[in-house]
Image: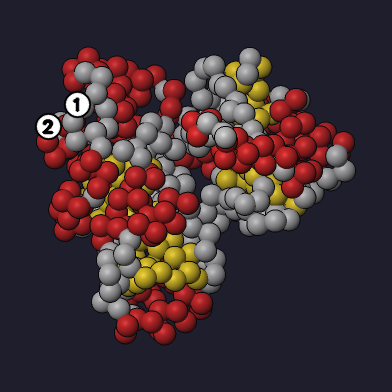
Amino acid sequence: MNNVHELTYLKENIQELKNSGVYRTLPVNTGPCGAEIMLDGKKVINLSSNNYLGLANHERVKKAAISAVEKYGAGAGAVRTIVGNMDIHEKLEVKLADFKREEAVVVFQSGFACNAGTIQAITGKGDLIISDELNHASIIDGVRLSRADKAVFRHSDMAHLEEIVKAKRNDYQNVLIITDGVFSMDGDIAKLPEMVKIAEKYSCLTYVDDAHGSGVLGENGRGTVDHFNLHGKIDFSIGTLSKAIGVVGGYVAGSRTMKEWLLHRGRPILFSTALPPAAVGAITESVTMLMESSEYTDKLWGNAKYFKERLAKLGYNIGKSETPITPIIIGDEAKTMEFSKKLLENGVFVSGIVFPTVPKGLGRVRCMISSDHTYEQLDKAINIIENVGKQLAII
């Protein structure tokens, strides 16, 4: 008889991962996350991070983190509803609300925690959630935690969304329409103006997870809502503080009513220790820098345009990206992983993404461009991508 503590069933599951070729070990970065990194002891050009604006290792941001630790300590020491709510948390929320041009902001420990905590807090039995089929995993999990009924519309298909709303609206008290602002696998932008028109026509609430739009789209990186000038039209606007902002955490922007309710019913706020002072100090400085200047977002978009144009000229399929997220769609899963592996061997780290993260037959490597990249680095990366693509008969 097997010893139950040997976790035999998990060992068998792990072996299945190995047999199917999707088992992996974690790469180890031995320095800061920049345009070039030391990965497993080798210097490579990094095309796989979400550090869009290069703020994760910026001197001003690091100094702000150190200063916050010296004044407030290493940890908040409690949940915000007890004694973990420091004045720097309050000041950060005021600054973020100003930046986002919204009435109020409430900060969570991560973007994932925002969706896991908010969706279940604002919906319940007798409500309906309608979600884009390509929404992020954290939205899917947040929807599962809610007692509301669920429906899914085809990706960015506004006619299908309206069809569902029209058929079901009268059966429910509240209907919440949820979408990513920028979709992380293809880099396309949600059709927010059309979504808002449908929502207002049928008295529905709107919820946008703008993880990949925060710090990227809109004036100085204010996000997808700002990009479309839809302030006051999106009821719940979720942003991350771990991607373009360069630190960790997430937030929900919207009305004062939204904030007041989430401070009472947002479970990650109630049952998990508040963000540490270092993170809050660093985030505050990052947001301050974005409010001061558009130089970071300007450089990001300049680099993205340059990179995309060069890849397209080489004949790569870069999909329908409208943002710095640039997929190179290979198709075949095995060839995708071989492409990623060969790129790494030649000095470019860009992770392969295959089923089930993307549909079968749409395997790709996803290039994440940042404002930190120089044209020299991008040229070097493009040359390597060209050479490997020719070796594998992709182009």
Q: Report which residue position mark 1 lands on.
A: 77
Q: Describe residue 316's horizontal placement relative to residue 52 as left or right.
A: right
Q: Report which residue position mark 2 lands on.
A: 83
Q: Are marks 1 and 2 in contact (CB under 8 Å)?
A: yes
What amino acid does circle 1 point to? Gly
Q: CA distance from mark 1 to mark 2?
A: 7 Å
**Residue farthest left in this picture:** 82
Q: Secondary structure at mark 1?
A: loop
Q: Describe residue 390's horizontal placement relative to residue 94 as left or right.
A: right
What amino acid does circle 2 point to? Val
The one nearer the camera, 7 or 336, is 7
Q: Quadrant of residue 290?
A: top left
Above or below 362: residue 128: below
Q: Position of residue 301 (x, y in %)?
A: 54, 43
| Residue for point 31% across, 64% down | 147
As drawn, the label of residue 171 is none
Above or below 125: residue 42: above
Q: Secondary structure at mark 2?
A: helix
| Residue for point 19% across, 20% down | 72
Q: Position of residue 244 (x, y in %)?
A: 44, 38
| Residue for point 87% across, 36% down | 391
Of callouts 1 and 2, which one flags the residue occurring earlier in the amino acid sequence? 1
